[in-house]
């Protein structure tokens, strides 16, 4: 009986050691991309009305990119508000290292002023971009974000808006994205993951 | 069987039959009140999980769920003393994309055992033209009108949008 108990403890012990060895990397809150995705190349229009070249202006910087529209009080404010509060919690040493870039998918209604006012409700350092419909569609395609609902004909509402993916893409200083954060990401997800990214932890598919 | 027992059984059956007949009908005379899950009942409907997300502007999103354990009904109107207009918006596709166009507008069906759900990232009720921005901790009154059930007024708590992911069911 004692031998069996000792044997069980031994097996458990070996199992625990093996388990901790295998999970030397803690799980990430975000969704790890199956392969790294380069930061898209596009030149859009900033809220100051001037051309904004994403590659040139955010080179070497951690960049968080997402697409949305300001007239919706649902997804975009939740995404931005949650990220903003998390960045505030993390403090300037972390916050100052991230450029948050919002691109409107409703350029007809989202003027530079509208976008600026909307983003200033969160942080006036958030970057807001607009452009022609063609430029916006091209930018979404370059970022591998579906311009319209998948699986259906491109649906436009009676007010002309189109479906858009709601995820936030995080690019490292090397210009590569390895992890994205879907709608529903919590403040605690951001405050856990962002310092790890800054500290050099690299999300890799094997660590899921 | 004794004749007295027969009378009693007949009476019980008669009362039960009447009771079932009344219960299966769309009894719009049921008063509104607290439902089993703490929601607000009206007719065969129960409204629950109501809250509003604010991001400090003059528009906000209201969320709630309406369950129906009776005959088909529909939500025909929503209003609020704090908003100039309340409009149903959005729908969730399988791919996760969101169509920002109004979700077909009123009336919105509430079928038996098929709840009408407004939740973050899915459909929401957009409150527009707020007299002043809402603050976390405020309460907002929402007046709901239905095709069959009597109208109800419910109170929804206001939360900051940054808190909403913590409230969302995974």
Image: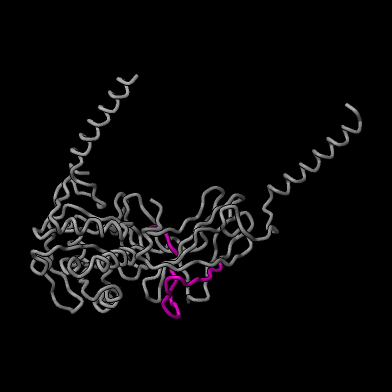
Residue A173 covered by magenta stretch: no
- Which quadrant would residue A65 be assigned to in this image? bottom left
Q: Quadrant of the N terminus of chain A?
A: top left
Q: Quadrant of the C terminus of chain A?
A: top left
Residue placed farthest to the right in the image?
Answer: B3
Q: Position of residue A20 (x, y in %)?
A: 21, 39
Q: In the image, is residue A35 above or below residue A53?
A: above
- Which quadrant would residue A199 be assigned to in this image? bottom left
Measuring 27% from the left and 66% from the top, which residue is drawn there? Answer: A89
Residue placed farthest to the front in the image?
Answer: A2
Q: Is B149 left or right of A97, judged from the image as shown?
A: right
- Total label count? 0
Q: Position of residue B149 (x, y in %)?
A: 62, 59
Query: Range of the magenta residues?
Result: B122-143
Q: In the image, is residue A97 above or below residue A145?
A: below
Q: Is A56 left or right of A103, judged from the image as shown?
A: left
Between residues B100 and B83, which one lies in front from this camera angle?
B83
Colour mapping = one colour
Measuring 16% from the left and 63% from the top, which residue is drawn there? Answer: A63
Between residues A139 and A175, which one lies in front from this camera angle?
A175
Q: Position of residue B100 (x, y in %)?
A: 36, 63
Measuring 15% from the left and 66% from the top, which residue is drawn there? Answer: A97
Residue B129 covered by magenta stretch: yes
Q: Position of residue A157 (x, y in %)?
A: 36, 63
Between residues A163 and A21, which one lies in front from this camera angle?
A21
């Amino acid at each position: 009986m004692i031998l069996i108990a000792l044997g069980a403890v031994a097996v458990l012990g070996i199992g625990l050691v093996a388990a901790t060895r295998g999970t030397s990397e803690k799980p990430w809150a975000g969704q790890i991309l199956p392969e790294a995705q380069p930061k898209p190349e596009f030149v859009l229009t900033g809220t100051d009305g001037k051309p904004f070249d994403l590659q040139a202006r955010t080179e070497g910087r951690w960049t968080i990119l997402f697409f949305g529209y300001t007239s919706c009080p649902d997804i975009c404010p939740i995404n931005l508000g949650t990220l903003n509060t998390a960045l505030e919690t993390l403090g300037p040493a972390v916050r100052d290292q991230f450029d948050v870039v919002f691109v409107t998918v409703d350029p007809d209604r989202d003027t530079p002023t509208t976008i600026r006012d909307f983003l200033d409700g969160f942080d006036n350092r958030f970057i807001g971009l607009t452009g022609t419909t063609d430029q916006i569609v091209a930018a979404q395609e370059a970022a591998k974000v579906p311009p319209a609902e998948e699986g259906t004909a491109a649906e436009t509402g009676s007010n002309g808006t189109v479906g858009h993916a709601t995820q936030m893409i995080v690019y490292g200083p090397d210009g590569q994205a390895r992890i994205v954060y879907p709608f529903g990401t919590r403040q605690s997800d951001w405050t856990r993951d962002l310092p790890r990214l800054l500290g050099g932890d690299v999300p890799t598919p094997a660590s899921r | 069987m004794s004749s007295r027992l027969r009378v009693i059984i007949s009476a019980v059956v008669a009362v039960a039959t009447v009771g079932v007949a009344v219960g299966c009908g769309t009894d719009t005379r049921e008063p509104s009140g607290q439902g089993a899950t703490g929601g607000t009942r009206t007719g065969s409907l129960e409204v629950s999980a109501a809250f509003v997300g604010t991001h400090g502007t003059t528009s906000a999103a209201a969320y709630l769920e309406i369950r129906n354990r009776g005959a088909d009904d529909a939500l025909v109107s929503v209003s609020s003393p704090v908003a100039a207009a309340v409009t149903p918006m959005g729908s969730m596709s399988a791919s996760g994309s969101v169509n920002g166009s109004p979700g077909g507008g009123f009336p919105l069906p509430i079928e038996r055992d098929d709840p009408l759900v407004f939740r973050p990232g899915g459909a929401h009720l957009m409150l527009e033209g707020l007299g002043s921005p809402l603050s976390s901790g405020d309460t907002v009154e929402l007046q709901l009108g239905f095709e069959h059930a009597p109208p109800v007024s419910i109170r929804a708590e206001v939360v900051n949008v940054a808190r909403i992911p913590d409230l969302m069911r995974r």
